Amino acid sequence: MKSTGKLARTALALLAGTAVAISASGAWAQAKDNRIELQWWHAMTGALNERVNEIAEGFNKGQDKYKVVAVNKGSYPETLTAAMAAFRAGKGPHIVQVFEVGTGTMMASRAAIKPVHELMAQNGYKFDPGSYISAVTGYYSTADGKMLSYPFNSSTPVMYYNKDAFEKAGLDPNKPPKTWQEFDPILKKLKASGSTCPFQSNWQTWVQLENFSALHNVPFASKSNGFDGFDTELQFNSPLHVRHITQLQTWMKEGLMVYGGRKNEANAKFVSGECAIHMESSAGYATFARGAKFKWGISMLPYYSDVAGAPQNSIIGGASLWVLAKHKTEEYKGVAQFFDYLTSTENQVWWHKVTGYLPITPMSYEATKQQGFYAANPGTDTSVQQMMLKTPTNNSKGLRLGNFVQIRDVMDEELEAVWSGKKSPKEALDTAVERGNRLLRQFERDAKRS
Amino acid sequence: MEKRVVFQNRYLPYLLIAPQIAITIIFFFWPASQAVVQSVLREDAFGTRSYFVGLENFIALFEDEYYLNSFKITALFSTLVTTIGLSLSLLLAVTADRLVRGTTAYKTLLIWPYAVAPAVAGALWGFVFLPGPGIFAWLLLQAGVDWNFHLNGDQAMFVVVVAATWKQISYNFLFFLAGLQSIPKSLIEAAAIDGAGPIRRFWTVVFPLLSPTLFFLVVVNVVYAFFETFGVIHSLTRGGPAKSTEILVYKVWYDGFEAQDLGGSAAQSVILMVIVIALTVVQFRYIERKVHY
């Protein structure tokens, strides 16, 4: 009994000592750093995570009033869920990175967000919609051009192709197919030369349905793809869409196209040289530059040449930064200053060059060009050019749909039913539209209750 | 005659039971009541607005063909996992019971998979069946099967069942072995003297005596298939392709976390809670009557 008492006292003393030490060091840390902390939650992993940390560091070094703390919260859905839970508990971050499909959900949560245009105006930064690349910022703006969230990492799908495989098949490696009509003979030649995977596409819903619609200037959904109201209906079951999916299905049956999964799992098969033509986000550039042991090129997405107005312009994917409500005025001032820092040409050029993501101002595009980056890295400007082909129309500004996460899954499921031969393209697209519309109606009902 | 222990202090028993009650309230009653409340609300993802909608969430669920389909998938999945798992482990236990030498090594090896986390089990079997590098996938391709469980729903179900069953066999095996070893040798010997062969002895003597164990395991396995296979499914198929492996629990997670539909997700949790309560009632009633410790 006596010994345990002694032990307990020793433990207590130790604990007390530690507690004092901790509180002392805490006080010291506070005294040293009385900056206002700004939480930035994001979903960037690997090399991109490091880039994000560099941005925060650069901003923190440049001034001594605010301190941006960048925290990785997992995948995009995980980051969003974490921010929502934290907001409910009154501990939401100042800035949260939300993927493009979450835009509708964020917009509908009006009481939880602070629109970026409002934030900038209140803190004395002039906001001129004309000074941005509208095809990029439009995705995150209201119908009359007011920016709701800050476009952080935007990319657009482009076509990558293996020049060595083209040569082997007796094709001109500097003449990738420009139209879908040119695809068929080229794929057949690739197959004849022994290719087991002439063509594949990542992100099938984003590339083959969403961007396909924008490039051909046909609506993906009514009401300007949802920009003009929640009472929008999906329209991606038009004859042109059915024609395209039927074409892809035919190629798969003939072994000219291979299905490699919903996301970017198929990158590995392009890097290994197995697949000759590959559609992927412009941000995939870094992966191929590092991994591919053969000559490859980048070109714009193909289109059907008999469709009037094609090619229009492609739309973006990626994520934007949303500012959450219920923070102090003083903190918002810091967030505005941070966004201003991000928009500087110097930062935009750096971000564009190291990641392959799109710049958001025409000035930074020009600056990158003048520095000779595009000349030294041919193909890196394909994405920007494809975005700026023409002035965006109501069909090519972007998509503004509620419950879009589920709608993408529905499209994926129905497309997979086509690839596995369970459904005809028309049947699958009709079902996808019908199921998607049900999700849109549910979202509309919820939004109207406010 | 029953023995009764009487506490001297009136408050001591309450004090002693308090931690358990507190834990139950914090970890069960509180979240469960939250789920019930949320199931009759619709709210935006940030919880800034919420509206009472009565049973709308439940009605929407039962009008959703994919939810009803999820019941069918769950039934099929749990039936397969339970029957295959129980038959295989019974077979293994019977053979282990007959072993004379090397029993310990055999038993140890059989118990190992139980220590593997569901997500790891999923990743492991996913690799084995992965079209391309996977060894089983390669064998199946050689046999002329058009194998790709990322596109074929039936194949996906097969892979998920294999992974989930494999993990549960150890647990079943342990209980069956204990059950077998508690059967008095005299009964089996008496049957043998009466001229019954090994197979007949098993079905007429051993199997009926094992029935309480069997019933207990059926309940445990069904509960396992319903609620503890999330990791396996998430790492293998994510409920796909085309929702063909989306069991009820997986849909709760998907609707709540991926789709941010909290009302719908909460309504599903409430339905699941009812199922669990029903299962527990069945289990207790039966075990009270049949099992003697």
Image (cartoon, helix red, strand yellow):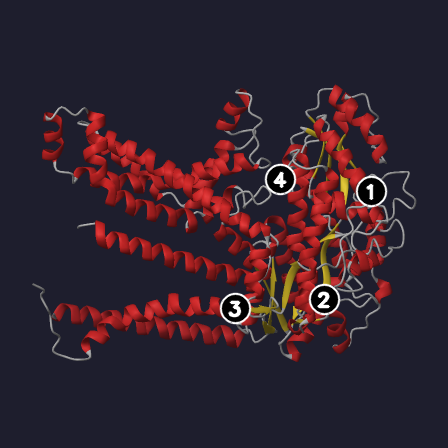
Q: Quadrant of the C terminus of chain A?
A: bottom right
Which numbered disc, 1 or 4, marks the residue closer to the eye? 1
Q: Name the front one of labels 3 and 4.
A: 3
Q: Secondary structure at mark 4?
A: loop
Do labels 3 and 4 touch, CB within 8 Å?
no
Of circles 1 and 2, the one toward us is: 1
Q: Give the CA distance from mark 1 to mark 4.
A: 30 Å
Q: Position of residue B154 (x, y in %)?
A: 53, 35
Q: Quadrant of residue A111?
A: bottom right
- Left or right: B131, with A288 as reference point: left
Q: Residues within 10 Å of mark 3 (few under 14, many from 20)?
A: many
Please name the residue that numbered disc 2 is placed on.
A339
Amino acid type, mark 3: Gln
Dot 3 and dot 2 within a common chain: no
Q: Position of residue A292 (x, y in %)?
A: 68, 33
Q: Which residue is mark 4?
A: A265
On residue B38, which mark appears? Answer: 3
Q: Residues within 10 Å of mark 1 (few under 14, many from 20)?
A: few
